[in-house]
Amino acid sequence: MSAEVELALYAGSFDPPTYGHLDLVERASKLFPRVLVAVGHNTQRSPLFTLEERLELLRGVCRPFSNVSVDSFQGLLVDYGKRVGARVIVRGLRAGTDFEYELQIAHANADLRPEIDTVFLPTRTNYGFISASLVREISSHGGDVSRYAPPSVCVALEHKFGKAKPPV
C-alpha cells in the first residue's frame, strides 16, 4: 500500500531566487497537490539577503502558483518535513556533479526519515548553468541578470549592491 503524496517540499537557500528555482517550483506545482518552498536558515553561512528578504522575494515570485506556499526552517530538512507532513523532497539537478552530492544527501535523508522520499528533477537546458552564486557575482559587478532572475529579484540585487538605477 503506497502513501499518496499531498505535500512536496522544495528547500534551499534561495540567495537569491533565480529562474532555475522558479522553473522547479512551477514543475513541482504541476506534479504535486501542494508544494512548500522552504528557505533553510543556516547559521554557518552569511547570505547576501536576510531570511526575511528571501522569504519576501520567494512569496512574490511564487504568487502565481495557487498550490505553493513559502516558509523557513532551521535544523534538518527531514525533521522539518516530518513536522509539516511532507512525503516528498524535490531536488533539482543541473549537472552530473550535482547528482553525486544530491544522491548522498538523499541517502542520508532516507536513512534518517525513510517515510520521506526524494524526487530529482533535472533542470531545463536553458537553466542548467544558472546558480544563485553566479547571479550574485554578475550582479555585484553591475552586470545584467534579467535573463537569470525575476524582475523583483533584479531590483533587490541592484539595491543590495548600490547599483539601483535612478527613476526615469
Image: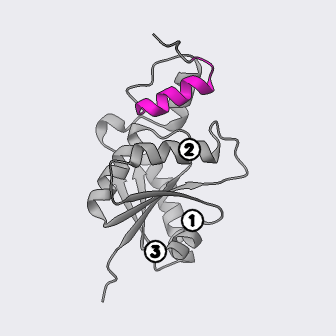
Instruction: Identify the residue position indicated by label 1 in the image.
Output: 77
Which amino acid, mark 1? Leu
Q: Which mark is residue 62?
A: none
Magenta stretch holds residue 154: yes
Q: Residue at left 55%, top 18%?
A: 164
Q: Residue at left 51%, top 37%?
A: 132
In this rendering, position of residue 140 left or right of residue 28? right
Mark 2 burial class by Cα count in 10 Å: few <14, some 14-19, many 20+: many
Q: Residue at left 28%, top 62%?
A: 31
Q: Quadrant of residue 67?
A: bottom left
Instruction: Identify the residue position indicated by label 3 in the image.
Output: 116
In this rendering, position of residue 93 left or right of residue 142? left
Residue 49 location (% of width, % of height):
62, 38
Residue 95 in sight? no
**Mark 3 or 2, which is nearer the eye?**
2
Residue 18 location (% of width, % of height):
44, 38
Magenta stretch holds residue 31: no
Front residue of 117 and 48:
48
What segment is highlighted magenta in the picture?
149-163
Give SS at disc 1: helix
Distance from Cα at disc 2 to Cα at disc 1: 18 Å
Instruction: Identify the residue position indicated by label 2 in the image.
Output: 54
Residue 79 location (% of width, % of height):
58, 72
Q: Quadrant of the N terminus?
A: bottom left
Residue 38 in sight? yes
Name the residue furthest top. Answer: 168
